[in-house]
Amino acid sequence: MSSSIAVAIRSLSKSYTITHDQEKHYTLAEATLSRLKNPLNRSARETFWALKDVSFDVNEGEVVGIIGRNGAGKSTLLKILSRITEPTAGQVDLHGRVSSLLEVGTGFHPELTGRENIFLNGSILGMRKAEIRRQFDAIVDFSGVEQFIDTPVKRYSSGMYVRLAFAVAAHLSPEILIVDEVLAVGDAEFQKKCLGKMHDVAAKEGRTVLFVSHNMPAVENLCGRVVVMDRGSAAQPAETRLAIRHYLENIVGSAVLATPLAQRTDRTGSGAVRLSSCHVEDAGRQRISRIISGMDVTFVLGYACRAGDRPAKVDVGISVSTSSDQLLFVLYSGYTGRLFGPISGAGEFRCTIPRIPLSPGSYRLGARIMADGEEADWPRDGVCELEVVAGDFYGTGSQGYEGTSPFMITGDWSGA
């Protein structure tokens, strides 16, 4: 990696003034009349700091992820880096041309065709027409909108917008590429294509990429370092897995999983059956806080049916994900031929996994209930954290090769 700095951010802060009117006005006439009647009345004002004293560097040819909860300040930071808005305090030094993909349609003129917008964006980046022409076919081919390239982009779907916008941003040779969560609009195939292109522009072309996403596996796969943002502040860039683990365990996990399951609001479903509690037991039915690799464990899910409901067929599923939110496995009771019902009132579901094959590390347990073919309850952020410690999985005293895989498997070896 080059030691030259592509992006230098020093003590960056951004504030907004929020006005709180004591009286709501729905028309200009109402607002004018109110001011005439009460000329000395002043609205309450509040200063909101979207960014607070943010400082870090990004090297040339580096792919850096920026993660954080909604409202953490990620988009504000990118808008300042893209020169869309000015900071309240601090300084940003950018060494090279910047191309940004922040929102669907940003930088496109809706009345112009896709072809015309490609040349417009290239001109904004300071490129000559000859340079744009050389890349034109590659841009159109990558975007997959060749059939509509001479159609005004106001007629494009959001997915088509993103396809063309990303293709333009990635192919018109900016030294710094800034990509926000906007890629989530595209389909899975196109997202994979975009991630591959971002990897290529950094690894093969030496360009710098700043990537904001809530897709932790994508961040882990693409980024060498990650900046974690929280309430306008940003930690120094850290090794990707460590940064993601800190974010999930201390920012997301602490805020969500600290709330009793019965009181959680991050859930979808009809509510006919709701998860009310979760814990883990060993083979002796004793509650445990840590799991030993290779031990028999039972996941116990408490539930409560809505008054008057009596589902006839209930399918219960659990999932286990890594600390970076990578799904490892899903197991529904229906997979094993077991549906529950009819049920009513309160009770518990129990799922025993013999010789659990998880390597040491931190994981998250998810759970979902389907009742009579419809989703009844799904807490989206999981139901509890799982801490797995080393054990004698193989029965030989060997703990395996640590850190290479979340799974431990066994098999029969033979040979001469």
Image: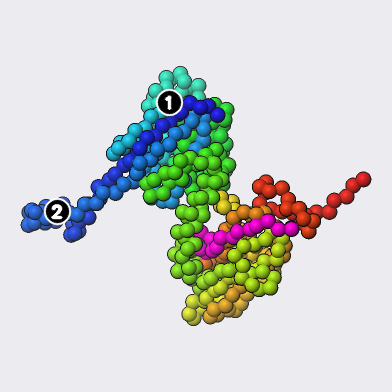
Indicate which disc, 2 or 1, sits on the residue closer to the N terminus.
2
The residue sitting at 43% across, 46% down in the picture is: 229
x and y percentages locating residue 136 in the rendered image: 49, 26
Badge 1: residue crowd in 10 Å (few <14, some 14–19, many ≥20): some
x and y percentages locating residue 19 in the rendered image: 22, 52
Does residue 83 show up? no
Specify start and end residues of the magenta stretch as a single range: 378-392
- What type is the residue that disc 2 sits on? Arg
- What type is the residue that disc 1 sits on? Gly
- Badge 1 is on which residue? 96
- Badge 2 is on which residue? 42
Q: Quadrant of residue 24?
A: bottom left
x and y percentages locating residue 121 in the rendered image: 40, 29
Residue lying farthest right? 416
Q: Secondary structure at mark 2?
A: loop
Q: Are marks 2 and 1 in contact (CB under 8 Å)?
A: no
The residue sitting at 52% across, 29% down in the picture is: 61
x and y percentages locating residue 238 in the rendered image: 51, 41
Compared across the picture, whether 319 is left or right of 163 comes to right
The residue sitting at 37% across, 35% down in the picture is: 10
Q: Is residue 369 magenta?
A: no
The residue sitting at 73% across, 50% down in the picture is: 400
